[in-house]
């Protein structure tokens, strides 16, 4: 494993993974903050220890909370794929330049996707999602080319 820490491609993969993981943590914190702002809680014990005027969510979430949750779930769906494909790219010895491009495009597109998702900006949300999906597809192609070479 120590050999990987000297590999510039692994370093970029690790950096992108850290940025995307931080993004997941921020979206989780935003969910809690939006829920607190709406004075709604999911668990009875949270209502007991919170400020006056809060209530237990019985029906659908507040729209602002639900939007953050959707952005969070959307990132959660593609992140494990990136983690797996990125590591396979590093280990399979794919074209470093191709992998760098895919890693950076995916990371930037996913960060921007959350920003536009939270701000209700279409068609940008769909475009950024598609760009990130193409970056994942690019990693698949790089892996296949490296394995078959």
Image (tube, grey):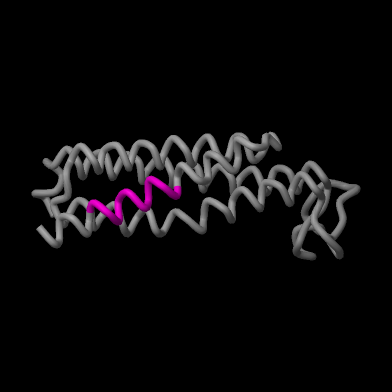
| Residue at the extreme right | 53
Describe residue 118's horizontal placement relative to residue 93 as left or right. right
Q: Residue at x 19, y 51 (%)?
A: 90
Residue 40 location in percent, x, y?
Answer: 82, 53
Looking at the rendered structure, the number of numbered marks drawn on it comes to: 0
Q: Say if the magenta span includes residue 144.
A: no
Q: Say if the magenta span includes residue 136.
A: yes
Closer to the camera, 36 or 140? 140
Residue 131 location in percent, x, y?
Answer: 46, 42
Q: In the rendered image, which quarter is residue 73 located in?
A: bottom right
- Magenta part of the chain: 133-142
Q: Residue at x 77, y 55 (%)?
A: 49
Residue 51 location in percent, x, y?
Answer: 83, 46
Q: Quadrant of the N terminus?
A: bottom left
Secondary structure character of the magenta stretch overall:
helix
* In the rendered image, the vertical position of residue 48 relative to residue 7, given as above or below: below
Residue 91 location in percent, x, y?
Answer: 16, 56
Q: Quadrant of the C terminus?
A: bottom left
Q: Residue at x 44, y 54 (%)?
A: 79
Describe residue 56's horizontal placement relative to residue 74 as left or right. right
């Amino acid at each position: 494993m120590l050999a990987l820490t000297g590999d510039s491609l692994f370093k970029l993969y690790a950096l992108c993974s850290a940025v995307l993981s931080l993004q997941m943590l921020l979206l989780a914190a935003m969910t809690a903050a939006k829920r607190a702002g709406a004075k709604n809680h999911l668990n009875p014990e949270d209502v007991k220890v919170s400020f006056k005027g809060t209530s237990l969510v019985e029906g659908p979430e507040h729209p602002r909370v639900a939007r953050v949750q959707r952005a969070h779930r959307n990132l959660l769906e593609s992140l494990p794929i990136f983690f797996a494909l990125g590591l396979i790219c590093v280990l399979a010895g794919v074209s470093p330049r191709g992998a760098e491009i895919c890693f950076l495009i995916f990371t930037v597109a996913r960060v921007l996707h959350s920003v536009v998702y939270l701000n209700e900006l279409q068609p940008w949300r769909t475009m950024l999602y598609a760009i990130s999906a193409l970056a994942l597809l690019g990693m698949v192609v790089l892996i296949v080319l490296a394995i078959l070479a």
